Image (tube, coloured by chain):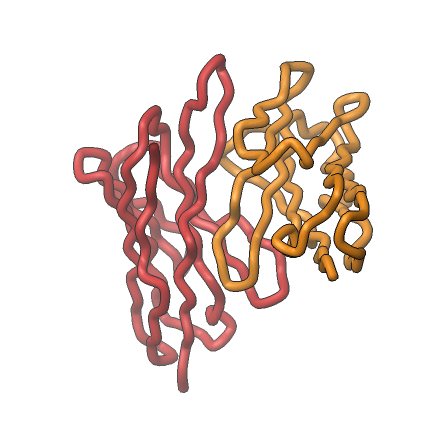
Amino acid sequence: GQSLEQPSEVTAVEGAIVQINCTYQTSGFYGLSWYQQHDGGAPTFLSYNGLDGLEETGRFSSFLSRSDSYGYLLLQELQMKDSASYFCAVKQDSGAGSYQLTFGKGTKLSVIP
Amino acid sequence: GAGVSQSPSNKVTEKGKDVELRCDPISGHTALYWYRQSLGQGLEFLIYFQGNSAPDKSGLPSDRFSAERTGGSVSTLTIQRTQQEDSAVYLCASSWGVDTQYFGPGTRLTVL
């Protein structure tokens, strides 16, 4: 089977840095994605790591260590609008050339003044 | 171009009735996914269509759930004999591959 673990809630101060961790256990692992979802909204893609290391996109960075089955999303210079749920998702080979994303339960980030 | 659209945005039905949810993916996207999200929970994979290949139905929770994709574009998710536990937001996503999925706004289903 497969499982993803991420903290259910995180609170951080505006302007600070926050790291959201994700550990996974899965077969056929290809890569790790991160999605952001505001309350009442649809998930939107943030980043994808197919290789070990750090990917940076503006204030957001994502890291993957395949040997540790671990990744994280790093948000810098936090803004109030960053308050949302953040989901890690594993891309995995489900067989016969088919791939799918398995999502974690999400981390609710609250940014406070 | 237009994003993924879903209809209806909200659906209230009585237990035991059938419902159909529609998804219009981004034009040209070969992959289409259906997910279910209960309040405050993560996304539960339901079914995946890729081009003309047979769909991956491994996430469908019961045989009351089915989906089809006509002409490689529009998809319909059908839930027969709805139950109260089917109440959730049903999200559709499309993509060229799996790395980046573009989600629609979802259909909020309430079964009374």
**Count of picture labels:** 0
Residue at 30% across / 67% down in the picture?
A18
Residue at 56% across / 57% down in the picture?
B38
Q: Position of residue B89 (x, y in %)?
A: 65, 54
Check the image and report above or below for B12 versus B29: below
Check the image and report above or below for B63 versus B93: above
Q: Where is residue A59 in the image (x, y as percent from the top left)?
A: 40, 61
Check the image and report above or below for A85 versus B54: below
Query: In the shown orientation, is residue B55 left or right of residue B19?
Result: left
Nearest to the observer: residue A68 or residue A24: A24
Residue at 74% across / 62% down in the picture?
B112
- Chain B: drawing colour: orange
Nearest to the observer: residue A10 or residue B66: B66
Q: Which residue lies furthest to the left in this view?
A: A67
Give the chain coloured red. A
Q: Position of residue B23 (x, y in %)?
A: 76, 40
Query: In the shown orientation, is residue A42 left or right of residue A37?
Result: right
Quadrant (top left, top right, bottom left, bottom right) of the C terminus of chain A = bottom left
Q: Which residue lies furthest to the bottom in this view?
A: A113
Q: Position of residue A41 (x, y in %)?
A: 62, 61
Residue at 34% across / 32% down in the picture?
A1
Nearest to the observer: residue B21 or residue A79: B21
Query: In the shown orientation, is residue A82 left or right of residue B67?
Result: left
Which corner quadrant of the image does residue B18 belong to? Answer: top right
